[in-house]
Image (cartoon, rainbow, N blue to C red):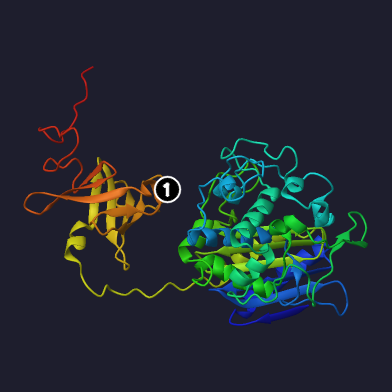
Amino acid sequence: MTSSCDELLPGTRRALLHRVAVAQAEGRAPSLVAAVARDGRMVWSGARSGADGQVPDADTQYRVGSITKVFTAVLVLRLRDEGLIGLDHPLEKYLPGTGVGEVTIAQLLGHSAGLSAESPGPWWERTPGTLRPTLGDVLGDRPVRHPAGRRHHYSNPGFAVLGSLVEAVRDAPWEEVLRRDVLEPLAMDRTTAQPVAPHAEGWAVHPWADVVLPEPAEDLGLMAPAGQLWSTAADLCRFAGFLADGDEKVLSAASVAEMRTPSVPPETGQWDGGYGLGTQLARHGGRSLAGHTGSLPGFVASLWVSVDDGVAAVALANATSGPPVGAVAAELVSIVAEAEPRFPEPWRPLATADQPLLEVTGPWFWGTHPFVLTLSTDQGLELTPLEGSRGSRRNRGSSGRGSRFVGQPDGTWTGLDGYHAGETLRVVRRPDGSVDHLDLGSFVFTREAYDPGADVPGGVDEKGWRGMTSPEG
């Protein structure tokens, strides 16, 4: 067993290494390597191997399967950010003749284009890509299985199509574009389309006996953008940091956040989460995770990032099946996040006081529902529902209708999330300049519940609040 670490507490390091050891033993994997990153930097790695003298480390390559799809999605988002494509545009506009009609690029990224799950013909993961020399061979005669945009249906050929889109727009091979636009800027020099030593060999483990069988490692050809890559735990930790914070050399923080935003609901019963634009989304132990799992014959892989905790984990094994690396990576995130929670940024007062903004902070009422409007350090506003008349705070996104807002040049505010995402918040003033009410997408918020002095839709009964007498009898 090997382990390298920096900064994590001894108890945390032992818990991580123990989880790796249990996963390798119970999953009967020839080897398993894992790593944890915190705030974009790898702080621990550990490995376990059943082969004497062949213990991998964070620099050993494993095939990562469908984690490749996240890289392909990054290439597509770069095209969008450069104004070369539109996500809502039909694929046919940029890649005519595919036979998949008017499906959009966004639908392909989110697996809602309705395309078939697999390519026709021999098992594409165990056969050479030369058997599928054209997109027609990849898609087959009946590529569309569901109406586009109606449901989540995972599609490997869909990402082969996206890889061909990248090649068509860039006029260069997918692998070359990936190296130039993503891998080199992120210093991921151990992530390649073909294995480069040191790398693990792929094995199948007999389901009822402790014997193994070597698996083929084929070049997938046009299917490469769906699952070709080899990578290391160290390189994937770098990529995890990028998925959390972005990198202006590749994609902005706003664009990677868009990748982590749910695009369509998941297929019923498939996983506790969803799918963004090229990223899987999951919930584990109350945490929101983004990343992807992957498998190809001989290998299973997983990468998960908890943006809120600033923690990411990678788990890689060289077995066709057995170790639940998706769960292992999620548990490694939880081990670090719970044992060594992130320190909050120090509270600092604002540099200046914006009096018009201060004037609108505090309690507001939508009808009889109490809310509080607060001013954040980045000059944004946050509207939070209060629990009943006592005013205890309720989390944004619960049964209340809370949102964060960002200011606009015209003096209005635009909702960023929650019920009011994209809606406009306006401060409505009286002729003398005092605040009458807030208008939020036609909802009127007043300083008092049904304030008789404010412009409440429908008016307020002039007799005001009153008691109720019980009916006689």
Q: Name the residue under label 1.
A: 398
Query: Looking at this view, is 111 or 403 the one in front?
Result: 111
Left or right placement of residue 192 versus residue 277 in this view: right
Quadrant of res 126? bottom right
Residue 294 appears in the figure: no
Left or right placement of residue 460 versus residue 384 in this view: left
SS label for mark 1: loop
Q: At 51% from the left edge and 68% from the top edge, which residue is drawn?
A: 246
Residue 144: x, y in percent? Answer: 67, 38
Query: Looking at this view, is 345 or 246 the one in front?
Result: 246
**Please, is residue 278 above or below residue 90 in the view?**
below
Residue sitting at the far left = 432
Left or right placement of residue 442 versus residue 267 in this view: left
Residue 177: x, y in percent? Answer: 63, 66
Residue 398: x, y in percent? Answer: 42, 48
Residue sitting at the far top = 473
**Please, is residue 387 above or below residue 232 in the view?**
above
Q: Residues within 10 Å of mark 1 (few under 14, many from 20)?
A: few
Q: How many marks?
A: 1
- Viewport quadrant of the N terminus: bottom right
Query: Looking at this view, is 423 or 118 the one in front?
Result: 118
- Viewport quadrant of the C terminus: top left
**Please, is residue 321 above or below residue 439 in the view?**
below
Q: At 50% from the left edge and 47% from the top edge, which residue is drawn?
A: 88
**Please, is residue 165 above or below residue 234 in the view?**
above
The kind of residue on which mark 1 rests is Ser
Residue 44 appears in the figure: yes
